[in-house]
Image (cartoon, rainbow, N blue to C red):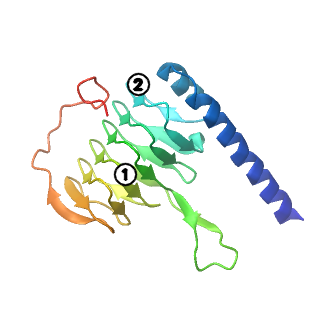
Amino acid sequence: MKDRLRRIYYSWLLSMNYISMAFIRKIPSQTIRKQLLRMLGAEISTHVSMFSTVDIRNPKGLKIGRGCSIGPHVMLDARMGLEIKENVTIAYDATIWTLHHEMNSADFHGTGAKTTIEDYAWICSKSILLPGVHIGRGAVVASGAVVTQDVEPYSVVGGIPAKKIGERKVHDFTYEPYTHMHIV
């Protein structure tokens, strides 16, 4: 009985999250959308650009630093904690997971870990970050990559699963993705 009540409660919370996000996405003002997300527990710094089609699972577990740009149709799963540091660019249709199912579990229970993206990282379009990965400062995740392990600072990774394919030559960044010159 206790497990059944726990499942009902969890389902209710998920439903409220989906309903809240469906409402928030319809608001044309970024300022109001971000303020509502803050009211739901998200920590969103100043100068953050978020398209209206961003999907957030559990805003309470989300922390976004100054100067970030979150592109259209991005999915941010913050159920186990998601920290996006400063001046990070997350491009169109990227997906960041913090929770998934244990495939070898009889009850298919959820398992996961906090995901962290360091300053000036660039998560390109249609890439996927799996739970618990740490993306280093200035790292680039190429379009379509599936990241299953931590990414070293200034590395460029691509493929399925993502492997190092290069390195960024510049380490002293001055840009802010939030500005109109760098918006996704």
Point out the tag, 1 or 2, that comes first from the N-terminus: 2
Identify the disc placed on residue 46.
Answer: 2
Q: How far apart, in angstroms, are the residues tagged by discs 1 and 2?
A: 26 Å
Which residue occupies 44% across, 45% down?
Answer: 83
Q: Which residue is mark 1?
A: 126
Q: Residue 159 location, x and y as percent?
A: 28, 65
Image quarter (top left, top right, bottom left or bottom right) of the C terminus: top left
Residue at (35% x, 42% y) in the render: 90
Image quadrant in which you'd find residue 40: top right
Amino acid type, mark 2: Thr
Among the 4 quarters of the image, the one containing residue 112: bottom right
Which label sits on residue 49? none
Task: Identify the secondary structure beneath mark 2.
Answer: loop
Q: Is residue 45 left or right of residue 16?
A: left
* Side of 129 relative to 19 (left or right): left
Q: Are marks 1 and 2 in contact (CB under 8 Å)?
A: no
